[in-house]
Image (spheres, rainbow, N blue to C red):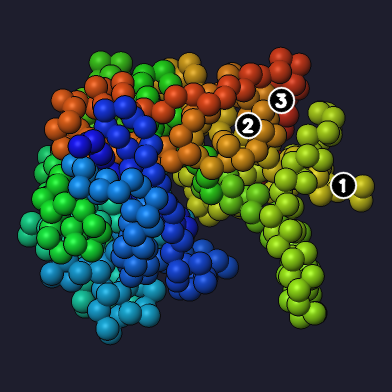
Amino acid sequence: MSCYALGLDYGSDSVRALLVDTATGEEIASHLVFYPRWSKGLYCEPARDQFRQHPQDYLDSLEEVMTGLWHKAPAGAAQGVVGLSVDTTGSTPVAVNKQGVPLALLPEFTDNPNAMFVLWKDHTALREAAEITAAATRADVNYLQHMGGIYSSEWFWAKALHVLRCDEQVRAAAWSWVEHCDWISALLSGTTEPQVFRMGRCAAGHKMMWNAQWQGFPPNRFFTAIDPLLDGLVDRLNPQTQTSDQVAGRLTAEWAERLGLPEGIAVGYGAFDCHMGAVAANVRPGVLTKVMGTSTCDITVTSKAQLADKSVRGICGQVDGSVLPGMIGLEAGQSAFGDLYAWFKDLLLWPARAILPHTAAGQNAELLKVLEQQTLNALSEAAHQLPLSDSAITALDWVNGRRTPDADQSLSMAITGLKMGSHAPQIFKALVEATAFGSRAITERFRAEGVPIESIVVIGGISKKSDFVMQTCADVWNCPIEVLESEQSCALGAAIFAAVAAGVYADVAQAQAVMASPVHKTYLPNPEKASVYDRLYQKYQALGRYVSGAKS
């Protein structure tokens, strides 16, 4: 019987299941399911930067995606699965009770957004993030020194404190808080109760201030000095974290039956999607892996000797073993990439969406569907034909704040150079360039801080959807870009870790040699355009300085 590893990838909108042959690396079958409540826009208020996801969405979609997977996989394949691992978005925490149950799964909290998972892009905790940064800056030990020096509203402690402050009922019922990637792994292995709950290294190190230098998390007194509402929470977190190649537990009989899997197979420690995706991309020192989707996440690794005692400024953390065991994982990223394009599409389609549904059905419904599907393609084709000029429109990519370098989620985007003759393709071109410029700023920060970046590998939906976006990035970054073959790189990374946790391979490197994704396509920079983009990048930076200064 063939031996398979299963990767489960919880993205912003959907969950994917990927079945991989551990002996050949062949992707046998995959299936995707969208979260039903999220798809309806429930529990979210974009105008307030509130984005919440119901835990029941995760559970319902998990069963549905596995049912769909077995309809596509060869007969009997389920019995050949030896291990599974999970990746999720992050930081996406939730309040749990003393039994480790997310509060929204209890009848009294079922429709309370504060009792749900606070999605990574929820920015309601701006005030709390600023307070945490200030507290760390004035403390005897700066507990953010390995997290870029700035705490983000996208991260665990800020989100927990914000909810505790604004919801008395949740505050009274919350015993602890857990990250999505750790909760799913614990749920499948029956270890959700706080006294036995175990965390992976990834979320704890990059979002929760865990570090071996202070034997776990900052002390309780650090958090109570910020707000007494945090008193005792850190003492209920297990400071013993593990890398993702280790076994978090064994699949319970209940979940084995619900998912159609063998009972007792290995469940690996969970991690964030971008970190596992980087493993599928053969991440290594000098190589930056970019996961390009609604946002971006940039991952690289370096040796402890290379980094020495250096703390890289303004990134999302450097954590021993968060990506590859034995190496320092470094994370950065942009709060909006594909989301910026989606925002512009929504802006352009507002009249059609407002008018067509109220007219006769049939043909108009089909027209609206075509507009939804083809608007970005048409904009890309038209933008591609536009000449490159120093007088072009300049835009910032901060429509959802700035993640890195130097996190500041209160920042807004800006566009300059608009005239009466400016049209939609010109603006779209400027938005694409803005996302490429924002990414270049991250690469330049790594290099300035002594982390070598010699090549870039890209995974994620956008890398396969738009030649225009990818070629623009190659020209702006002035370096070759390799796009991977796998359509499910994050799930593939999870499957690689599952194979190691199950004992099929002795370590991650051996598993990567067989299971990692090959390169699908390479984009090469145009030297003439690269020189123009060097000048336009200076305009992007100048606009960024102006907007940042105006905010302060």
Looking at marks 1 and 3 on the same chain, the residue that comes earlier in the sequence is marked by: 1
* Amino acid type shown at disc 1: Ser
Q: Nearer the viewer, mark 3 or mark 2?
A: 2
**Label 3 residue SS:** helix
Residue 137 marker: none
Badge 3 is on which residue? 533
Query: In this image, 12 relative to 102: left or right?
Result: right
Which residue is label 1 attached to? 422
* Image x and y of residue 181, in percent: 28, 51
Where disc 2 sits, the SS reads helix
Res 489 → quadrant: top left
Q: Is residue 42 above or below residue 329?
A: below
| Amino acid residing under circle 2 | Met
Outermost residue, bottom direction?
108
Choose between 153 and 78: the one closer to the eye.
78
Q: Nearer the viewer, residue 456 or 494?
A: 494
The three-letter code of the residue at mark 3 reads Tyr
Residue beneath the point at 17% across and 31% down: 504
Give how far across and how far down residue 27 sits, in percent. 38, 37
User: Closer to the camera: disc 1 or disc 2?
Assistant: 2
In the image, residue 378 lies at what x, y percent?
77, 46
Q: Residue at x 36, y 21 (%)?
A: 284
State whether residue 464 is above or below residue 37: above
Q: Earlier in the sequence, mark 3 or mark 2?
A: 2
Question: Quick one: quadrant of the N terminus?
Answer: top left
Residue drawn at x 31%, y 62% is 63
Image-based side of 422 in relation to 136, left or right: right
Q: Earlier in the sequence, mark 1 or mark 2?
A: 1
Question: Residue 385: in sight, yes or no?
Answer: yes
- Residue pushed farthest front? 75
Residue at label 2? Answer: 470
Quarter of image, res 330: top left
